[in-house]
Image (cartoon, rainbow, N blue to C red):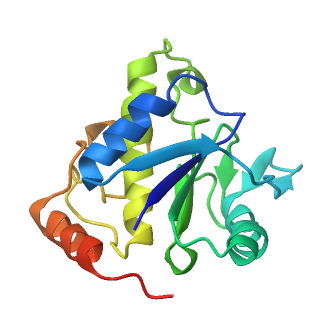
Amino acid sequence: MSFLIFWDNSSPQGLQGPVARGISGILERPVEVVENPVILRGFDRTRNQYNASRILTDMQDIYTRQHGIGDHILIVTGKDLYIPGRDFVFGLARPNIRASIVSTARLRNGYYGRREDVYDAIDRLIKEGTHEIAHTLGLDHCDDIECIMFCPNTLDELDRKRKNLCPQCREKLTLALEEPIQD
């Protein structure tokens, strides 16, 4: 079982290493970063955002079927994401295809008029990236507001989360990582 981060050229550069190491530390598995080979479609002109669900559908149709990839994939993009019925999402996962996506757009302080801080961005990307990858492993949302698997609706809720899993989610992750991959 391997974990790939597809780093889109619209994402801040220079964060790849710290983010991959952080996610790897939480998952206790190696994480590799590669340049994103997938064209991100799904731009909605009326919203000036990208439909995260459409991007993951394209990921399934174009990449995973053509390449038969069995890795767990996280796309990191700088494009602002939404799904129908929500104003925005920090990220989205499709466990059935082992693919997920996170956006750096609303993880940056500058989006909210705050002073930019690269360490805040790295911290948030590690939390959201791990959260979405864990969904691809079958973990659901958690009620513990400090657990990575808690579903934040605001940046403050995201910042309150710690870079670890609660004991129950850690146990679920451990079991998921032990299960053989079924194709």
Q: Where in the figure is residue 30, as x and y percent of width and height?
A: 35, 50
Task: Provide residue 57's location: percent of width, then percent of height.
Answer: 72, 72
The number of callouts visible is: 0
Identify the residue at image location x=70%, y=73%: 60
Q: Residue 74, can we see it?
A: yes
Residue that extends furthest to the top in the rendered view of this protein? 115
Q: Is residue 180 above or below residue 25?
A: below
Q: Nearer the viewer, residue 116 or 68?
A: 68
Q: In the rendered view, does 73 fall on the left or right side of 83?
A: left
- 123 vs 150: above or below: above
Furthest residue in direction left, as rendered: 167
125 to 111, vertically: above or below: below
Q: Is residue 153 visible?
A: no
Write the residue at 84% across / 52% down: 43
Looking at the image, residue 74 sits to the left or right of residue 11; the answer is left
The percent position of residue 54, horizontal first and vertical second, equals 75, 66
Most foreground residue, 149 or 20: 20
Judge left or right: residue 38 versus residue 29: right
Instruction: Compare residues 114 and 70 and report the one nearer the observer.
Output: 70
Q: Residue at (38%, 21%) from the top-left corner?
A: 119
Residue found farthest to the right: 45
Where is the N terminus found, in terms of image quarters? bottom left
- With respect to residue 161, does 60 lie above or below? below
Which residue is painted at 54% across and 73% down in the image?
Answer: 70
Percent from the top left, x then y, of residue 112? 55, 25
Viewed as shown, does residue 146 lie left or right of 79?
left
